[in-house]
Image: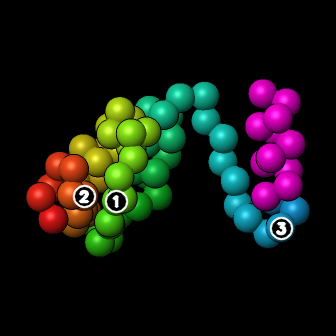
Amino acid sequence: MIRLEELKQKLEKNGNVVSVFETAKEAAVYLDSKIDNKLVGIGGSGTVNVSGVYELLKTHNEVHWHWKSGA
């Protein structure tokens, strides 16, 4: 976890906003709370696939992801 904290600090030093989560599901819930009534495009991602973020977002956004939506 120390290397992750170092990476987070470097990214923040360069002006990025960084959030760290213990699980992919926690990250998905966070994204779901921040993205509402938007058009969302998702590239190929195994992490997105297992996190459930697509299923969460599609309930209140227009989501296009070639792996699931056929877009």
Residue 65: mark in rendering: 2
* Quarter the C terminus occupies: bottom left
State the extent of the magenta-drawn residues as a range. 1-11
Residue 47 seen: yes
Q: Is residue 60 visible?
A: no
Q: Which class describes the residues within 10 Å of circle 1: few (<14), some (14-19), or many (20+)? A: few
Q: For this view, does 63 lie left or right of residue 1?
A: left
Label 3: how many residues lie within 10 Å, few (<14), some (14-19) or many (20+)?
few
Q: Is residue 4 magenta?
A: yes
Q: In the structure shown, which secondary structural element does the residue marked by tag 1 occupy?
A: strand
Residue 19: x and y in percent read 66, 48
Residue for badge 3: 14
Snapshot quadrant of residue 20: top right
Question: Looking at the image, is mark 3 or mark 1 earlier in the sequence?
Answer: 3
Q: Amino acid at mark 3?
A: Asn
Q: Residue 24: which disc?
A: none
Write down the quadrant of residue 49 in the picture: top left
Query: Mark 1 = which residue?
Result: 42
Mark 2 touches mark 1? (CB < 8 Å): yes
17, 10: nearer the viewer: 10
Which amino acid does the dot numbered 1 rest on? Ile
User: What is the distance, in whole Å, between disc 2 and disc 1 at their CAs?
Assistant: 5 Å
Q: Given the image, on which type of amino acid does mark 2 rest?
A: Trp
In the depicted structure, whether residue 18 falls above or below residue 15 = above
Q: Residue at x 39, y 39 (%)?
A: 46
Indicate which disc, 2 or 3, sits on the residue closer to the N terminus. 3
Asked whether 40 or 36 is in front, the reply is 40
Q: Does residue 26 sit above or below 12 in this rendering?
A: above
> Are the residues flagged by discs 3 and 1 in contact, CB closer than 8 Å?
no
Distance CA(mark 3)–CA(mark 1):
25 Å
